[in-house]
Amino acid sequence: MTQANIRNFCIIAHIDHGKSTLADRLLEVTHTIPKRHMLDQVLDNMDLERERGITIKAHAIRMNYELDGTEYILNLIDTPGHVDFTYEVSRSLAACEGAILLVDASQGVEAQTISNLYLALEHNLTIIPVINKIDLPGAQIPQTKHQISELLQVPEEEILLASAKEGVGVEKILETVIKKIPQPKGKPEQSLKAMIFDSLFDSYRGGVAYIRVVDGSITKGQKIKFFSTGKEFEVDEVGYLRLKMVPAEKILAGEVGYVMANVKNVADTRVGDTITDAKNSADKPLSGFKHIKPMVFSGLYPTAAENYSELRDAMEKLRLNDSSFTFEPETSNALGFGFRCGFLGLLHMEIVQERLHREYNLSLIATVPNVEYKVTKTDGQIVWVENPALLPPPDKLGKIEEPFVSVQIITLVEFIGNIMKLCTERRGNYLTTEYIDKSRASLKYEMPLSEIIFDFYDKLKSTTKGYASLDYDFLDYREADLVKLDILVNGDPVDALSTIVHRERAFNYGKSLCQKLRELIPRQLFEVTLQAAVGSRIIARESIKPLKKNVTGKCYGGDITRKRKLWEKQREGKKKMKMIGTVEIPQEAFLAVLKVER
């Protein structure tokens, strides 16, 4: 089929605006999937995706549709919907010529909608605005139309109305996709250039790259090269994507498909990388590729020490299908052997933990999430610290820089004051307020990433009664007055509870944490002292009173010295027990750290 009859597009939307449901209806209308194989959220093949109503892993599918007697190939490249996966979204957008901008009629334009829209406009994509869920009782169609019209600078009559759940307006969307989205502009006669927009690992065939061929063509038996690594492979199979992979002889310029080339490591099929012909190589790769860097770090430890090797094997398998997940072994005095893991964000961290628990039946303890700090020592050496325990001692510490992000919050006008107060408490620098319409506003701040990764989103939702949406992008590293806060149990530091906080917050956070731990750590036969320390200075202290046996219960009358001897003997025994006894810290104590107000 010629490029004139190919359309490559994606759907961009905020979480829970009906993106997966619309994809289901498109597949039904184009008869891509037989009715007996049809499920809700058919492209979301992970249980977690179905339960949470979010897309975690990008998917692509090829549909055939006939309009005015001409058959067209429509390649729908689904995108993840969360801010953690912004890079994957940008690569999926780069593989398309157009995008359906989907907005919930009851929710209106939200932060992630705008963020992904700007990404699409950066790639010069043709935007087709669609208002979804028009059948809901709370649908505010005129207001939503006005918001989209203001945002895109398009007439309101060009905005399509649909109900993906009921199947209303779906054929009109397909018709508009064919008429408005331009055909691919690849050059079939040039040397191969194909972009990887996603990859996965097959146990038998190795790394599978999902590709969009920009120029040239890719055929079975062809020798190919990956630009980022320089590695060469022979193509074992190519084809296009239905619900399953359908082998083909070749994939031409403008088409979307997959390639298998016996790649043993999925890390070689990096998202955004360019594939070219090994013999007749292209001059330069396609633009936009970058190495994905973890932004949030946390330690994962098995609750039972004997499960360490099982955890390592499970993580190895998980990394085969998720090259953005990183881990390396580490040891904690409190928790034993475990791994320091790097994630794209908090949702990514939650998903990995949940998958380890569900798919591999592992019970885990996670330490406090941290960001990566840029530390300059007094001798000028720069070190990157993602584990507070590895922070150099104060006498060797020059300065600490932390990652800053630009934050966009969209909310109802009545909650602006609450949000400003919250952002100021979290060390935010106010930039601008823009009014989308009479009732909604967009606030922009610059904030430290460490202030967002804890409970900022929960606080934002509660302070705005749920009427706020958040989006953020990495900016740069900036110097800050940060200190390492240690928690001492009976004078011994518990490295898994250490964290890096702003100096002004250290006292309140240390005091709150000690009070919380006092409630959670069980009483012992000796007194347990909990202390929060910054360097050698103790800034907060709590004590857990000992359990006491009534040793004089059997003494009836007689001289008081008899009782005093027994009390003295008990006191000596407790002193000795405190010297040799250990305190078991329950799993709840490590989880409590996440809930303590910073």
Image (cartoon, rainbow, N blue to C red):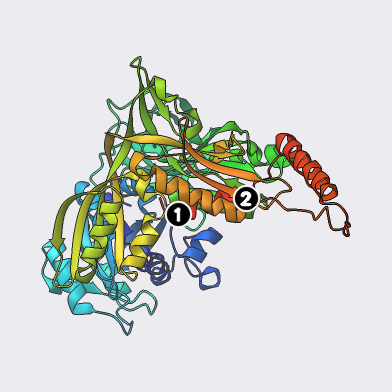
> In the image as oriented, which residue stretches furthest toward the bottom?
137
- How many other residues sit within 10 Å of disc 2, few (<14), some (14-19) or many (≥20)? some
Q: Within the image, what quadrant is residue 194 found in?
A: top left
Type of residue at label 2? Ile
- Badge 1 marks a residue whose secondary structure is loop
**Gap in angstroms between the C-alphas marked 2 and 1:** 44 Å
> In the image as oriented, which residue stretches furthest toward the top?
379
Which of these two is toward me, 299 or 573? 573
Which of these two is toward me, 294 or 62? 294
Viewer-nearest of discs 2 and 1: 2
Q: Is residue 480 above or below residue 151?
A: above
Q: Which mark is residue 349?
A: none
Type of residue at label 1? Ile
| Residue indicated by mark 1 | 56
- How many other residues sit within 10 Å of disc 1, few (<14), some (14-19) or many (≥20)? many
Which of these two is toward me, 543 or 158? 543
Q: Is residue 320 visible?
A: no
Whether residue 220 sits left or right of residue 575 in the image: it is left
Q: In this view, does 423 lie above or below 157?
A: above
| Residue indicated by mark 2 | 544
